[in-house]
Amino acid sequence: MSIYINLDKVLEDRDMKSHELAEKIGITRANLSILKTGKAKAVRFSTLEAICEVLDCQPGDILEYKAD
Amino acid sequence: MRVLQILKTLINFLFIIYTLVYISMIFLCIYFLCFEHEIPSFLNIKINNLRISHTSEITETGKAISFFITYFIVLSLTLGSLFFLRKFVHDIKPRNIFTKKQTHYLKRIGQCIVGATLAKFIFTILWRLYFNITNGDLSAEVYAELGFGATDLFGNEFFIICIGLFFLFLAKLFSIAQRQKEENELTI
């Protein structure tokens, strides 16, 4: 996959732990881990919206395209 | 899932019966090769329309051995299809569906059904040819029967091959479903 998830970096900038984010956006830690490790096949708009709202960022801050 | 329970029971029953037939055929073959060298009088088998009994043409050891080989190939493939069908049906559970294993089983069922039907059909033609030639009757009509009767659809080779191909197609569908299920599970 050429799409990379920069959630770790954004979380570090916001000084927030993964489990806190998972609780706030209402997904399980396991699912957040799948998202962070890049194993996810798709992200729902509702999930992306919740992440952006909680972390006060843009989708582009979390998702990045890099050509393989 | 009551239908599944009935299916499981029926397949188990068929599998046990066919396994017993298979094992008894092995013993019969050993008995025949070691002691009799002739088809026992109680044996009366019919493959397609070729009757195998002590009164038929197959009385020589060579012919009988080739008959047993034919019989074993067809029976092994039939038993194989039942074996994989049994595994497939036992593997299916409401929470465990569209797995790689199930796709593999469906593929094997299809291959075994097509293989067994083709083997049965080809061997019947070869046997007819063989008997006509060894009997010295080269002018005799060599024919292969394909039934298209209205009441005997399940005895028709083409229909059985269709069922086998359907299983192969089902394996492809399972493979697609398995990918989509995986994608759905990995959607956050």
Image (tube, grey):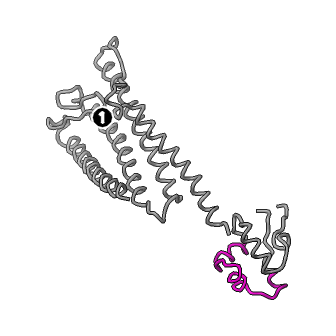
Main secondary structure of the magenta stretch: helix
The crowd level at tag 1 (other Cα within 10 Å; few <14, some 14-19, many 20+) is some
- Tell me the magenta residue range: A10-37
User: Type of residue at label 1?
Assistant: Phe
- Residue B6 screen position, x and y as percent: 31, 55
**B19 relative position to B187: left or right:** left
The answer to which of A31 and B135 lies nearer the viewer is A31
Which residue bears the numbered disc 1?
Answer: B67
- B121 lies above or below B177: above
The residue lying toward the viewer, choosing from B134 and A68, is A68
The local secondary structure at tag 1 comes to: helix
Residue at point 43%, 39% (across, down): B163
Magenta segment includes A19? yes
Which image quadrant: the C terminus of chain B?
A: bottom right
**B96 relative position to B14: left or right:** right
On what subunit does the disc labeled 1 rest? B
State which quarter of the image contains the N terminus of chain B: bottom left
Q: Nearer the viewer, residue B123 or B154?
A: B154
Horizontal side, residue B31 vs residue B14: left or right: left
A35 in magenta: yes
At 42% from the left and 31% from the top, the residue drawn is B158
